[in-house]
Amino acid sequence: MPEAIPLPERPRLAPGVRLHFDKTRNAWVLLGPERVIETEGPASEILRRCDGTRTIEQIVDELAVLYTAERTEIAGDVNDMLAELAAKRLLS
Amino acid sequence: MSMANPVQDVPAPLGLLAELTHRCPLGCPYCSNPLALDDRADELDAATWSRVFREAAAMGVLQVHLSGGEPAARRDLVEIAAAARDAGLYTNLITSAIGLNSARLAGLKSAGLDHVQLSLQDVDAGTADHIAGYAGAHGRKLAFARSVTELGLALTINAVIHRANIGRVAALVELADQLGAGRVEIAHAQYYGWALRNRHTLMPTRAQVEHAMQEMDDIRQRYQGRLAIDMVVPDYYARRPKACMGGWGRRSLNVTPPGRVLPCHAAETIPGLEFWSVLDRSLAQIWQESPAFQAFRGTDWMREPCRTCEMRDIDYGGCRCQAMALVGDAAATDPACELSPSHALPRGVAERESAIPMGDYTYRGRVPDNTATQPRQRKATQ
């Protein structure tokens, strides 16, 4: 395993990456250079909050409310997903 | 072939390659555009491109690649880019940088351009300009790359790899990183169109390819999380074919400067295919019904060994244009596949041609070219 990439304090989508609602496929998709990544419900909720104003903690708080779930469980999911996005250089 | 039965409900494509012009100031020997280029006088106007983009977005296309030739050769490039973005498409500009000063680049940024893909020919100006056949190109590209990142636009560096630069893959990636690129394409030359004519001067040796492939593993490790790196594999030495275009008529389409719609940008090298034009029909109808898209869509057209192969829905039998170029039969298994009865052919060609001492390139547009002066063969419907 390569070493983990440090996560930004207030994550936002990298330049050239944007979230788009695809009416044809009725899904949120993340668009980047030569990349189309379909996102499911929770993932798109996380991505929509990666706007450079919210901290990771705030994103976790909001999702815990949205899904009425344990904060620790949500935190794990959010961190995993952000780490994956960072590794693909989709966050800045 | 399934031409008799129009296929219903073909899934929507994701990407559109918009070839705005075949004009280009560079003369790259590996150019994959056809031998006979389309004329400026026949290029679609901006209003037609705008309509094509709206139709593309309505049918489910998400990304458009503004390409050429050199798209900046179009005076109305900014207007065209704005139309693509207004249609809701993720808009990528594929450019050599020649013809794009900072004012035009700023105009593109204001138009909503999402991403810039810049070609580099090598790491040093001397060899890079020699490959491009254009003095001063490399310096302008480096300056342009800096302008792109200063404007906050996302940048990909694309480097076509061949015998003259295959030893500098790591240096090319390093240069891309220094220029602030977020992504690099290491594209081993593909031999279609003009590139086929220069194949003997471009083909690397097997040892060079093996070294470059091993080097890629280290490079990926080194830039993990910093640079996204994609590779087009050198398939003359491969054991299995590339999943060309992600399958014929499955994920993307290509519109030529005068509006013919192709399943891939080399598809016109296949004789007998009937291409429809955006001047005559909607993009959606062409995607669903045009004979060229139907010809190799899905797996019904396949023969053995593809027809019963467990990889048929993964690699789609490889590349139709390569089968045509090497075996003379577009419905044959791509000979890059070791299951093809012609598999010895590409490797034999590669080993033979890479052993020839490197001569001069035949530059695009720099020499009298008999083929290019002949009128383009017209298709049955035109």
Image (spheres, coloured by chain):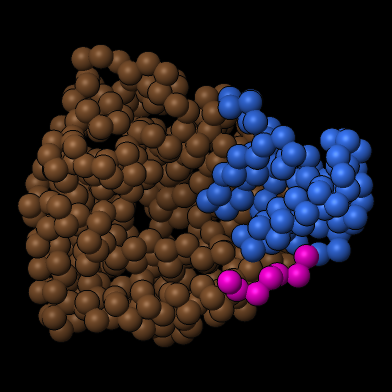
Is residue B170 shown left or right of residue A36?
Answer: left
Question: Against B293, is A49 above or below?
Answer: below
Please give the name of the residue rendered at 30% of the width and 31% of the height, measured from the top-left corner.
B298
Question: Against B99, is B308 above or below?
Answer: above
Magenta stretch: includes residue B135: no
Q: Which residues are magenta?
A: A1-7
Q: Colour of chain A?
A: blue
Q: Quadrant of residue B332?
A: top left
Which chain shows up in brown?
Answer: B
Question: Against B230, is B335 above or below?
Answer: above
Please give the name of the residue rendered at 70% of the width and 60% of the height, measured from the top-left corner.
A83
Q: Position of residue B266 (x, y in %)?
A: 28, 46
Residue B129 vs residue B198, the one in the foreground: B198
Q: Quadrant of residue B57?
A: top right
Question: Against B377, is B322 above or below?
Answer: below
Quadrant where the N terminus of chain B sits is top left
Please give the name of the residue rendered at 45% of the width and 55% of the height, measured from the top-left corner.
B70
Is residue B287 shown left or right of residue B86?
Answer: left
Q: Position of residue B294 (x, y in %)?
A: 28, 26
Residue B257 visible somewhere in the drawing: no
Q: Position of residue B269 (x, y in %)?
A: 21, 44
